[in-house]
Amino acid sequence: MKNTMQSPEHGSSESPLTLTSLTEALRDQEDRLLPCVHCGFCLPACPTYVRLGDENDSPRGRLHLMKAVVEGRMSPKSKAFQTHIDRCLGCRACEPVCPSGVEYGLLLESAREVASKAGGMSFLSRALMGIMARQPWTNWFMGWARIFRWTRLPKLIARIIPKLQVLHPFRFGLAMLAATSETHLKSFTPKSSKNEKEKNDIIQVQPKGRVALLEGCVQSGLFSRVNRATERLLQVNGYEVVTVTEQGCCGALHAHGGATDSARKLAIANLKAFDSDHFDYIATNSAGCGLALKEYGHLLEHDSKHSKTAYAFSGKVRDISELLTMSNGPKVGGSIPMKVTYDAACHLCHGQGLLTEPKDLLKAIPNLEIIDLPGEEECCGGAGIYGITHGDLGVSIGEDKVNAIKNTGVDLVATANPGCIMQIGAGLILAGSTITAQHPIELLDESYRRAGYYAE
Ligand code: SF4
Ligand code: SF4
């Protein structure tokens, strides 16, 4: 492994005042930087370090760069800071293995904010964040994406485009869109729950709680079937589900991409829309969105007007797998004789500490054969739009995941994040595989259909 740790360099072209404003966010986080004892336990867990062997592309190296910026020894505009902070997947695999409890994910968001203010942002990131920040624009964008997907052209074109580096973003983007509709399960829309009366009796006699579901931008735009399945599963398992119409983007893409001000605005809008006093839980079925909601308290910790509400809101956020595995676990469904494997989305297993819960949902399905996936906790290379923007590293990480999945011999890989479904699904499509990437919720929902919980 080469160690090419770069020497901190002074930002001589900037005034101390500019540097102060740019590094303010990071300096704010200095307490979170200090606990690092440079032990290096995090290095083997880091997908970018494992592949590149460069200390600057390790968690410890990136912390070193952040510290250099905080202490004014390095310009946030420097190539080293910009490159290595950008290359981080934000997968948080470095957090659970750190004996000092360094809060790397929160530090990364501050570092990204500093880096993007100093060096700018790619056109693609800026465009996507702009669209996601405005609900009418998101609806318009997703509407056209659905029409294009319906033509089945994305899959066809993605498979015939030559495998050239320059065409990678276009080719992979099309495959990602195609992956959102790939399924091995029957498509169905129940008229109502067959057990409607029984369901209402459960809620009235022994309600488990009143739940509001975060619809999410990508989930509602391209995976509305997963949202509807989530609602059905919650109801069958005794929860009351309430629709919150004014909700918007959770801001995860913005927070992870360095647009923290936009992320805060979106968070405040959701605090108002949800008014969490009215709910026992706020449910999510997207690992990235769920983590963002659970971190609203941190995001708004210096906002005296919203901080308390944000922490209360975050305290009520639960992934769907947490809600369904509470108490006695989910109701057992009908048989699905199929081979599946489970890939742990980073922001669920590393970010939220949920590894067994999603698998327990799959275990509630009779005759479903669950094959272990080697490296199930390693990032798939999705990380927002990393698979598109980092054609080299994103592809290499993604190919390792796709090969591991293919080697299991399954029909379907279950993963609980839309970005991972799109990244893995795109890789499978481009590899000519028939394996589909789908949400575990879809499998349990199909199992309940087979058990007769829904009237079709
Ligand atoms: S494991 Fe934690 S303490 Fe050790 S080098 Fe990595 S971040 Fe620092
Ligand atoms: S978040 Fe992931 S890619 Fe980034 S430093 Fe940590 S382990 Fe490495």
Image (spheres, grey):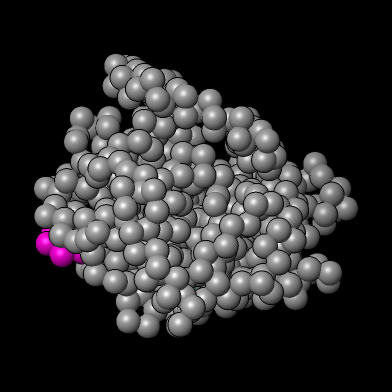
Q: Foreground residue, 170 or 234? A: 234
Residue 177 in view of the camera: yes
Quarter of the picture containing the N terminus is: bottom left
Placement of 159 over or under 235, stated as above or below: above
Q: Residue at horizontal 55%, vertical 50%? A: 216
The verdict on residue 114 being magenta is no
Image mark count: 0
Position of 351 with respect to 362 (left or right) is: right
Q: Residue at horizontal 54%, vertical 52%? A: 215
Q: Residue at horizontal 47%, vertical 24%? A: 147
Residue 289, percent from left and from top? 54, 56
The verdict on residue 367 being magenta is yes
Q: Residue at horizontal 38%, vertical 20%? A: 151
Residue 370, percent from left and from top? 17, 61
Position of 321 with respect to 221 (left or right) is: left
Give, as a single range, the part of the protein colored magenta: 365-370
Residue 61 in view of the camera: no
Residue 292, percent from left and from top? 58, 60
Placement of 102 over or under 292, stated as above or below: below
Residue 273, percent from left and from top? 71, 58
Q: Foreground residue, 143 or 438? A: 143
Q: Foreground residue, 113 or 301? A: 301
Q: Please tell me in which quadrant of the rendered image residue 125 appears.
A: top right
